[in-house]
Amino acid sequence: MSSELFSQPVVKEIPPKGDDLSAWYTAVCLRAELVSYSPVRGCVVLRPYGFGLWEHLQRELDARFKATGHENAYFPLLIPESLLMKEAQHVEGFAPEVAWVTQGGSEQLTERLAIRPTSEVIIGTMYAKWIESHRDLPILINQWCNVVRWEKATRPFLRTMEFLWQEGHTAHATAAQAREETLRILDVYQDFARNVAALEVYAGVKSESERFPGADETYSIEALMPDGKALQSATSHDLGQNFAKAYDITFADADRTIKHVHTTSWGMSWRMLGAVIMAHGDDRGLRLPPKLAPLEAVIVPIVKSGDERALARGAEVAELLKREGFRVRLDDRDQSPGWKYAEWEIRGVPLRIEIGPRDVDANSVTLVRRDKQKGEEGAKSSVAVEALAAAVREQLAAVQENLLAQSAAFLASHTFAVKEREEFFERCRNRAGMIDIAWCRRPECEAFVKAETAATTRNLRPLEGGEEKCVACGEPARTRAYFAQSY
Amino acid sequence: MSSELFSQPVVKEIPPKGDDLSAWYTAVCLRAELVSYSPVRGCVVLRPYGFGLWEHLQRELDARFKATGHENAYFPLLIPESLLMKEAQHVEGFAPEVAWVTQGGSEQLTERLAIRPTSEVIIGTMYAKWIESHRDLPILINQWCNVVRWEKATRPFLRTMEFLWQEGHTAHATAAQAREETLRILDVYQDFARNVAALEVYAGVKSESERFPGADETYSIEALMPDGKALQSATSHDLGQNFAKAYDITFADADRTIKHVHTTSWGMSWRMLGAVIMAHGDDRGLRLPPKLAPLEAVIVPIVKSGDERALARGAEVAELLKREGFRVRLDDRDQSPGWKYAEWEIRGVPLRIEIGPRDVDANSVTLVRRDKQKGEEGAKSSVAVEALAAAVREQLAAVQENLLAQSAAFLASHTFAVKEREEFFERCRNRAGMIDIAWCRRPECEAFVKAETAATTRNLRPLEGGEEKCVACGEPARTRAYFAQSY
C-alpha cells in the first residue's frame, strides 16, 4: 500500500492562492471533498461532491453530443497487444503509458492485454466489422468511460493514472465530412467551456509536435491558469485515413468502388474540472459556475437565543426552491452560521441564502453571491420570500455570466501579441500568459523555444496580414501561434 | 486475436424462441444490434441500441437511489493485491476470477494490481479514512462502473468477462440500520424490476451457500426465464461487521466508545437487460418495455405510387410527438414498409405508427402495439392525429402494463408449491420453474439436490404455518425456499 494515503495530512487551512497555486489547488481539492488520495499509486477517489461536478459536466456535454446526432456505446476495457500494435505512430505514442494484464485467475496469458489508454484501436476494429456500404456512414459514436495511462505523478484531475473521460469516434465517407465533424466538436467544446464551465478559451489547431499520435490534425481548446500556464481542456482529432488503413475500415461507395473511411476522435476528461477549480477559485476556496455546481444554493438559518423560526422558514424556502427545480440544501446542522458560511464558501456554492430573525419578521431573506468579494457591490441583497425563486434564477445567471466575464478579462489581459524576439523569449520564460506571435511552424523552432523557455505552442490560427517573419527565429511566418508553458 | 469476431456469422434469421432459447437469444442480441462480439475474449461491445437500454436502466435506477438519499462517487479500477487479501472469505470467492496487472509501461510491478471484480475492498479502505464520528454516518454511496471477472464463456449480458453495473456501498452505526438499508435497496430493485423492466420477480434471502463472499446475509430478486431457469437479477448484501473489521472501519459513537461500522453493498448489472430480452421477446424479436426502450415509437410512412404525402405527414407527427417528450423516430429510408415493420419488430419498439394515403386523407394514423400478436384484439387501432399524443401515452402505459401482467402470469403458472419428495426432484430436473418447498436450510441438503437435479435455492422466505418437514430430505423445515435451475 502506498504511504500517500496515510501521509496525506488533513487539510486545516487553505493557503493563499497567490502565494503557491499548486499548494492552494491541492488543499482546495481535498478540503472541499472533491477527491481523496487512494491507496493505489496515481489514482484518486472522486468523492460525491466532486462526482456531482462530473455529473453536470456529463449531462451538459452529453446533451450537446446528442443534439449533434451522436449516440453512446460501450467498448471493452482490455485490448490485445497485437491489435494495439497495428498503427505505428499510435503505438509509439501510447506504449510507454500502458498498464498490462498478464494473468487471469491462475492462468498466465499467452498475449498481454492493454488497459485502454484510449480506444481508437478497439473501436476501429469494430467499425471495420460494422461498415459495409456508404449507407452505413457516418457512424457517430461517443463513449463515457475510464482509461488508464501509467503515470508517476498524481495531481487531482490534472494528472492521474486512471481518469474518467468521454471519447467520441466517428467514421465518414469523405475527408471533408471528417474535417467538418472535427471542427463541429471543437465548437461544442468551446461552447461548453464558455457557457457551462464559464471559461474563455482559445480554440485552434495544434502544431505538428503537439499532435495526437496517428492524427492528421489535432485541434484543441486552451484555457489560461492564474500562474500564466495554459491548460489544454479538450482535443478533437482528424485522423484522416490512418486508422482506417491500419485497421482496414472500408466501405463500398455509391459508385461501387471500395474506399477507406475517414475517422475522427475527440475527448474531454475530468481535467476540465481541474481548469474550473484553478481558474475560478479564490482564497476562500472554490467558486463554482452554477451550471456545474452540485448545489446551486445553500440555506443557512440563523437561530438566535432559542428563536427557531429561522429554521422553519429555511425549510419552507428549501421546499419552495426545490419545487422550482433548483438544487438547494438547508444546512440545519448544530454549528454556528459563521462556520457554515466558511464551509460552503470552500465548496464554492454559488448562492448563500441567510435567514435571521429579522428576515423572518420582514418576510425576506438575504442572498449572498459567492463570485463577489465581501463588500463588493451586489454581493449581498435582501429579497422578499415571494420574489425569491425569480431572484435566485436571476442571480445564478449573473454569477455564471460574471465568472465567464472574469475569465475572459483575465485571458485578454494575459495575452500578449509580441513582435520582438527578446520580449517573446522573456514573456515565455516568465509565464506571462498566452504569447501570440507570427510563427514559422517549424518543429525545430518550437523545440528551440521549448528548450530555452519551457513554453510550447498551444494552438495556431491563420495569419491575418501579409508576409511576416517568425518572431522566434526570423524565418518566414506561416501561421499565428499562442505560445505558453502548460500543464 | 480471437476467432470469435470473424467466425461469428451475420444473423439473417432469428430461430423460433420455443425451439432453442439459447440460439434465439444470441440471434436476437446480435440481430437487434444490442451487442457485437469483440476481438477480446469474453467481452462484448454494447452497441448504441443496447446502450440506449442501459441508459434508461441507469436513469430510472439512479433516480431511485437519489430519492433514497444516495450519492454517486468513483473509486479506482485497480486494487493492490495486499489490500484485496484482507477479508479471507472475500478473497477466496473472488481470487480465481481476478485479472491481474503486472506491468506498467516498461516497469515490472513489485505488487500485482487486481482489476476490480467488485469494490468492497477499495471503498472500505476509503471509508476507514473518512469516518471518524457517528456524525459521519450513514455514508450512502453508489458507483456506476465497469468490473472484470475472468470468465471462459461469453453470453451477451448474462456472462461476460467485463460488464457494466452499479455497486452501492453504505456504512451505518448499527446492525439494525444496515439491515434496514439492505432491505430498502431490495425493495428498490423489486420496484425497478416490476415497474420499469416489467418483470415479476421473487425477492428474498439467499441460502448460506449462495451468499456473497463476506456477507452476513445476501438478498436477491429472481426472475424466471421461458426455459424454466431462474435468473438472479440483483443482489443486496448485509455485510455485518466483516469488512469493517478486516479494513478497520471504526467510529466514535455518541458515548465516545470506538465501534466498528456495519456495512452493506448491493448491485445490479447489465444482466438485468438479459432478463428483459429473454423474458419478453418473441419469435419476431425483442419486445421492450416502454420505460426501457431507446425508442418508444417508430413512424413508418407508406408511400404509394408517388404519393409522398405520408412522408410529410410522418415528419409532422414525429415533430408533434417529440415536442410532447416522446422518443420517436421517423423511418424515411428507401426500403418497403414491410421490411421496416420487420426491422422495428426485431428491435422491439413498443409502438409502430403507420401512415398510408388513406390515413392522410382521414387525418388519422394507424397505431400497432408490439406486445400483442398479429390479429390479437387491441393490436391495431386507428387514431385521429389531434388525439395522437394522448393515445400514444395511453398505449405505452398499456404495453408496459401488459408485459408485466404477462410476466406475472408466467411466473405464477410456473411456480409449484410441492409437498412430495419425488415430485420435487422431478420438477427440479425438468426445469418446471420455481419449485416452492418447505426446506431445512441445511447446505448438505442443498448440495444433494444440486447434485441430483442441477437446481439450487434461489431465495427463501419465512415458513407460513406450523411445523413442517423439509420436502427434499425430511428433516425439520426452517424456511420456505424456491428451488430452480439457474443462469
Image: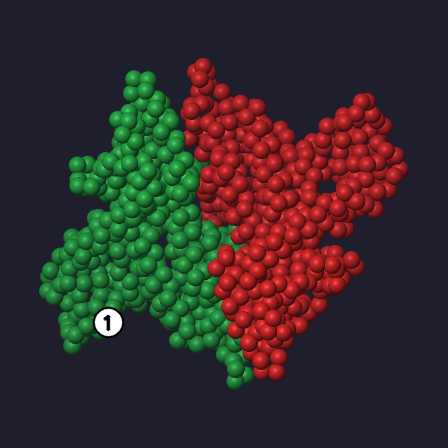
Chain colours: A red, B green
Measuring from the top left, give residue A176's x and y in whole percent.
57, 24
Q: Nearer the viewer, residue B286 or A464?
A: A464
> Compared with residue A104, is residue A83 higher up or lower down, i.e. above or below?
above
Give the side of residue A318 with respect to residue A12, left or right.
left
Give the residue at mark 1. Answer: B462
Q: Nearer the viewer, residue B41 or A434?
A: A434
Q: What residue is shown at x 50% (from left), y 30% (from top)?
A: A171
Q: Quadrant of residue B206?
A: bottom left
> Compared with residue B447, is residue A150 higher up or lower down, i.e. above or below?
above
Residue flagged by tag 1: what amino acid is it?
Pro
Measuring from the top left, give residue A300's x and y in whole percent.
60, 69
Give the side of residue B316 with respect to residue A12, left or right.
left
Q: Quadrant of residue B185?
A: bottom left
Q: Is residue A105 visible?
A: no
Q: Is residue B237 visible?
A: yes
Measuring from the top left, give residue B103's x and y in whole percent.
56, 49
Measuring from the top left, give residue A191's x and y in whole percent.
61, 41
Give the side of residue A224 with respect to residue A318, left or right.
right
Q: What residue is shown at x 68% (from left), y 34% (from top)?
A: A204
